[in-house]
Amino acid sequence: MIYLDACALLKFIKPERETSALRGWRQALPEATELITSELAQLEITRTLLRAGVDHQLVPHYTSQALKGIYVVDLSSTVLARAMAYRIPRLGSLDSIHLASADPFRAELTEFVSYDLELIKAADYLGFPVRAPA
């Protein structure tokens, strides 16, 4: 099972330096590999596309393309409570929600994929198997 945060998922629809490596990594995964993300990622992708000037009518299509084949973990009060409990001073609110969304699956996670340096540091500190295909 692999968790992908919003900045990783955005690279599938908004080409960046790491996009080709990320696509190659995903294509090489065994077919039965489960991919998960937080419901927060859907919000982050939507807002990022709108801020970038993408036509608001196309945003739902691009967002669904980014989330294709990925199980979306509900943003529940339990997730929010878990996010508030992290005692890492430099951990931002959104990053803490990504970690809290992935946490219940920690024993099954083989990778936690992100390109956000602060999130990577926090995830590594908490013992998540961090990866950033490049």
Image (spheres, helix red, strand yellow):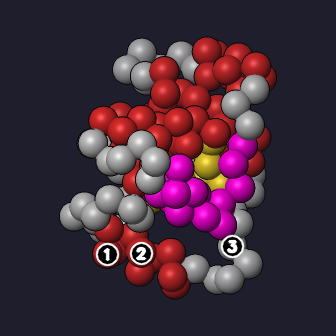
Disc 1: which residue = 20
Locate residue 111, reporting x and y percent: 56, 59
Out of 107 and 10, give the one closest to the viewer.
10
Q: Are marks 3 and 2 in contact (CB under 8 Å)?
A: no
**Local crowd at mark 3 within 10 Å, few (<14), some, or many (≥20)?**
few
Disc 3: which residue = 33
Q: Is residue 46 magenta?
A: no
Q: Is residue 40 above or below residue 66?
A: above
Q: Are marks 2 and 1 in contact (CB under 8 Å)?
A: yes
Q: Residue at x 50, y 75 (%)?
A: 26
On screen, residue 124 versus residue 72, left or right, reads left
**Local crowd at mark 1 within 10 Å, few (<14), some, or many (≥20)?**
some
* Quadrant in which the C terminus appears: bottom left
Instruction: Compute the Cα span from label 2 to label 1.
Output: 5 Å
Query: To which quarter of the image does residue 21 belong?
Result: bottom left
Q: Residue at x 71, y 55 (%)?
A: 71
Instruction: Compute the Cα span from label 3 to label 1.
Output: 19 Å
Disc 2: which residue = 23
